[in-house]
Image (cartoon, grey):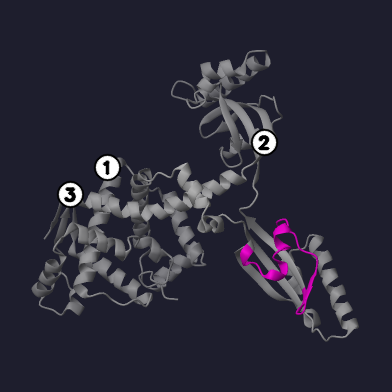
Amino acid sequence: MSIKGFPALQARNLLHRLPIASAQAVVRHCGIHFMALALALLVALGTSPARAATEILDQVVAIVDDDVIMASELRERLTAVTEGLQARGMEMPPEDELIRETLDRLILESIQLQMGQRVGVRISDAQLDQAVARIAAQNRMNVDQFIARLEQEGESYAAMRENVRREMILQRVQAGNVSQRIQISDQEIDNFLGTEEGKALTQPEYRIVHALLAISPDAPAEEKAAAEAHVEKTLQRIRAGEPFDQVIASSTGKYTFTGGDLGWRRASELPSLFADIAPQLAQGETSDPIESASGIHLVNMNAKRGGEQIVSQTKVRHILIKPSEILTDDQARQKAADLKARIEGGEEFGELAKEYSEDIGSAQEGGDLGWTQKGQMVPEFENAMDSADIGQITDPVRSQFGWHILEVTDRREQDMTDQAIRNKAAEYLHSRKYQEELDAWLRKIRDEAFVDIK
C-alpha cells in the first residue's frame, strides 16, 4: 500500500474535505475568469499544459483579504489532488478546470482560516496527537508505524501534522458557522420517523457471530448424535465464560466449525434461520443449538445498538468552591469541608449553595444539577456520586473545576428509547442538511471576501 501524498490512506479524506462538486458550485456562482488565469499561466510559461502545473514560478497568484496564495502552494495542492484522483482511478479533468477548482479551494480555505484566527480557534498538540492516532488506527497502524510508512514514502511527518491541524481548524470554523444555520423541528422529526427511510434508520442493529458444524443430511444417526454431543460441550464451555471465538477456533479436525462475524445488521437483514432467535439474545449471550439441513448452528450476540435503552440516572446537587488568587487550594478544600459540617449540623443545603456555590449554572437552583447519567460529569465527580448513598453529603471532591461537596437526592432507571430514536433521527436530518448549508455559507463568505487573482 503506497501512501505517497496519502492517496491510499484515510487521511486523504481529511486533507481534501471540499468535494469537487462543491468547489464547482462556488466557482460557477462567483463567475471568476479562472479560464483566463489558467491560459495565462500556460502561455507565460511557454510549456505544455501537462507540464505547466509543476513548473509555475513562485509568485503571488491571489490576494485574499489579509492573506496571499503563492504559486508554490497552488503547485503543491495540484500535485496532491492529481495523486488522489489517480489513486482512486478517477478520470482527470481538463488542466484548466483542475487549476481553477484547486485555486478556488485554496481561496475558500484561506478565508476560513483567517476567520478562525480572528475568533481564536486553536488546535492543541494533544488534540493533534489524538487526531493523528485516529488516522493511523483507521489505516490499521499505530503512530510509530504510520510515521515510519510516511518516511519510507518520502513524506514529511511534520508537514502532515500541520495539514491535519489546518484541516481541523477548517472543520471547527465550518461547524461553528454552519450548524447554527440548521434548525430541526419536532414536526420534521415526526414526519421523518413516519417514513420507510426513518423506520429503517431507527431499527435496532445486531452484530452476530455465527458458527456452523456441518453435518450431511444423510449422515448415520450415531454420527449426528456425536456431533450434537460435541456442540453441547462447546456450548457449555462458552456459557461457563470462555470467549465464543476462542472456543469455536479450538474445535478442529472432525468437528471444525465454519462461519464468522456477520457484521452489523438490522433485524430485517438477518438470515431467516435465526431472525426470530437472535434479537432475543442478550449482549454476549449464545443461543441454544439450531439445526438445519446444513448442520448445527450456534449464534452469539456480539453487540447491540439501538432498540430499548434503559439508563441509570442520578439526581444530584452540589456546592462548588474554586481556588483563586486570594483562596489557596487548601483553603478552598477547607471551606468546602466547613460547609459540609454546617449542612450536617442542620443548615439547608440549597440555601448554602445559593450563597456560596461558584457554579453559576446551578447555584440559584440550590445546587441542583437535575437528573444525570453516566458520562455527563467529570470522572472525579461521577465516582463520588456513584459511591454516595441517597441523602449522604460527601467529603470534598477535587475536580478540574475546584472542590465540590455533593448530595445524591434520588436514583432511577429511565427508559430513554424514544428519546434515543428521536436523537438519531435529528442527527440524520442535520447531516442531510449540512452539506447544503455548507455550500450556501461558502458562497456567502466568498462573495463577501476581497479576492484579487493576479
Which residue is depicted at the point 72% across and 63% down? 276
Q: Secondary structure at mark 1?
A: helix
Q: Secondary structure at mark 3?
A: loop
The magenta stretch is 268-296
Which residue is depicted at the point 49% across and 51% down? 192
Q: Amino acid at mark 2?
A: Asp
- Distance between the Cα atoms at labels 2 and 3? 53 Å
Q: Amino acid at mark 3?
A: Asp
Tell which of 398 and 89 is nearer to you: 89
Q: Secondary structure at mark 2?
A: helix
Residue 165 is inside the magenta segment: no
Say which quadrant the N terminus sits in. bottom left
Residue where numbered disc 1 is placed: 118
Tell which of 319 and 264 is nearer to you: 264
Please provide percent x and percent y for residue 205.
61, 59
Please provide percent x and percent y for residue 300.
72, 64
Q: Is residue 41 left or right of residue 73?
A: left
Q: Is residue 158 left or right of residue 450?
A: right
* Residue 361 in view (yes/no): yes
Please provide percent x and percent y for residue 282.
72, 56
- Distance between the Cα atoms at labels 1 and 2? 42 Å
Q: Which mark is residue 65?
A: 3
Which residue is depicted at the point 65% across and 58% down? 303
